Amino acid sequence: MIHSAIPGRMTAGPAANTESPQFLGPGRVLPGDSKRPGTNQLMVELDDELATQVEVAPAFTFPYQPVTGDRLLVLGNGTQYFAVGVLGGQGPSRLHFPGDVSLHAVDGKLTLASDQAIQVRAPKVTIRAGILRTIVDNVTEKAGGVRRWVRGLLAVRAGQSRRVIDGQDTTRCENSTTLAKDTVTIDGDQLHLGH
């Protein structure tokens, strides 16, 4: 049986050791320079009457990177303290896996969402899909070179089109048709027509 003596403190029944009170409550992460070198211990200021500063060992079952000022849920017995939860955190969550990693939604849809941005970084990215749809407001592409192979029809519909080619522009096809409602303008120093 656990009895609460004062907020944040828990003492066991009659056989409890009064010199090693148990603590379960919030604590604030102190600046990183107060961490003991060579360990993953965090310096935390407990939310108790004395604002006790203790070394706390992270015991999270989820990815979490502590940041100064974060509020943690701390469990301790007076000599050892463990951070078992995050009450309020600003640190990034990171997932690290050795080797290959696969995410698979079996008989369902996989959704990645972010309120700010999604970044994908890799030396090589391959996308395989039966249907690929891209719906965006604006697209900016920068590449050293681009090559496209389209088996069937390549159709482009745009409000306006403008191309600026610094070097040579070559178009090769079996038949070419240019249709304009009003005017076709060709401006150049020389115009060569041949067969």
Image: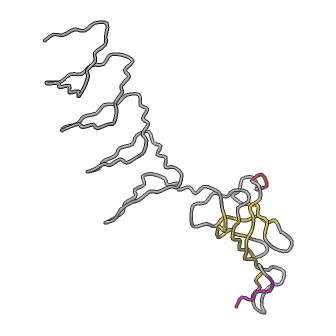
| Residue shown at the point (44%, 57%) measured from the top left | 112
Q: Is residue 128 above or below residue 61?
A: above
x then y, percent, for residue 106: 33, 65
Residue furthest top in the image: 190
Residue 160 falls left or right of residue 4: left
x then y, percent, for residue 58: 66, 64
Residue 94 falls left or right of residue 5: left
Residue furthest bottom in the image: 14
Residue furthest front in the image: 182
Q: Is residue 1 above or below residue 88?
A: below
Give the magenta range: 1-6
x then y, percent, for residue 4: 76, 86
x then y, percent, for residue 161: 34, 30
Q: Classify residue 14 by image quadrant.
A: bottom right
In the image, residue 24 lies in the stretch drawn in magenta: no
**Which one is nearer the viewer's eye here, 30 or 145?**
145
The C terminus, quarter of image = top left
Q: Classify residue 182 by image quadrant.
A: top left
| Residue shown at the point (45%, 51%) measured from the top left | 99
The N terminus, quarter of image = bottom right
